[in-house]
């Protein structure tokens, strides 16, 4: 219950604490959020080589200026697309976790572009979180109703059906 209190009592920096000098979902935006004691909401995509990248959009166009689908790239290729604001490279989930190191809670949204890969994304995120010692301050979410982690739903979890009009 104490870990839930950390989420409920801490302001959340949406995609990190970004502004006109720090790009969203960047290492510098995450550092700024940590310095202010804010929890971090972030988004992740699965790259072609199975690495989890921290990025919101399906395309790199808005943040990097190139109309390239993020899931079509490998982690090595992603380094060729610096963010237009500040020139940082889009971080991977392990890089972000190493930086945060339990200092603030993290809410991770799993983004899926290719429906057939959504279970792979969930499994890759769980793989990256396996050795993270601060799981009590991590929350996962997805708006994709088909995403599954491969683990069983807790007995207390309940599937919610949409209301009919």
Image (spheres, grey):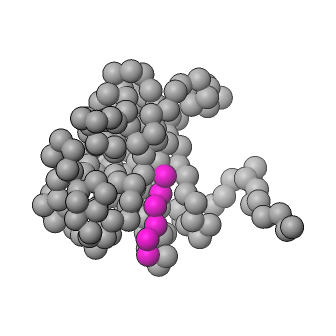
Instruction: Classify the position of the C terminus by image quarter.
Output: bottom right
Query: Which of these two is toward me, 148 or 15?
Result: 15
Residue displayed at 44% across by 75% down: 114
Q: Is residue 111 part of the magenta span, yes or no?
A: yes
Magenta stretch: helix, strand or loop mostly: loop
- Residue at the farthest left position: 80
Residue displayed at 28% across by 36% down: 20
Query: Which of these two is toward me, 35 or 86?
Result: 86
Image height of 71 relative to 133, above or below: below
Residue 164, position as x, y percentages in the image: 85, 68
In the rendered view, does 69 fall on the left or right side of 126?
A: left
In the rendered view, does 47 fall on the left or right side of 158?
A: left
Residue 73, position as x, y percentages in the image: 24, 69
Q: Quick check: can you spot residue 114?
A: yes
Find the magenta span and give its range: 109-114
Residue 83, position as x, y percentages in the image: 21, 51
Residue 124, position as x, y percentages in the image: 39, 60
Q: Quick check: can you spot residue 50?
A: no
Q: Is residue 142 part of the magenta span, yes or no?
A: no
Instruction: Classify the position of the N terminus by image quarter.
Output: top right
Q: Quadrant of residue 6?
A: top right
Q: Quadrant of residue 148?
A: bottom right
Residue displayed at 55% across by 52% down: 141
């Amino acid at each position: 219950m104490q870990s839930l209190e950390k989420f409920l009592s801490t302001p959340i920096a949406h995609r990190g604490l970004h502004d006109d000098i720090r790009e969203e979902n960047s290492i510098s935006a995450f550092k700024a959020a940590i310095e202010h004691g804010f929890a971090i909401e972030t988004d992740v995509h699965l790259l072609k080589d199975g690495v989890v990248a921290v990025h919101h959009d399906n395309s790199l166009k808005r943040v990097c200026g190139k109309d390239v689908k993020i899931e079509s790239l490998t982690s090595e290729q992603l380094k060729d697309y610096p963010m237009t604001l500040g020139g940082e490279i889009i971080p991977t989930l392990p890089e972000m976790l190493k930086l945060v190191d339990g200092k603030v809670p993290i809410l991770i949204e799993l983004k899926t572009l290719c429906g057939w890969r959504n279970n792979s994304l969930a499994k890759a995120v769980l793989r990256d979180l396996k050795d993270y010692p601060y799981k009590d301050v991590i929350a996962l979410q997805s708006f994709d109703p088909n995403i599954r982690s491969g683990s069983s739903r807790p007995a207390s979890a309940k599937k919610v059906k949409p209301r009919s009009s």
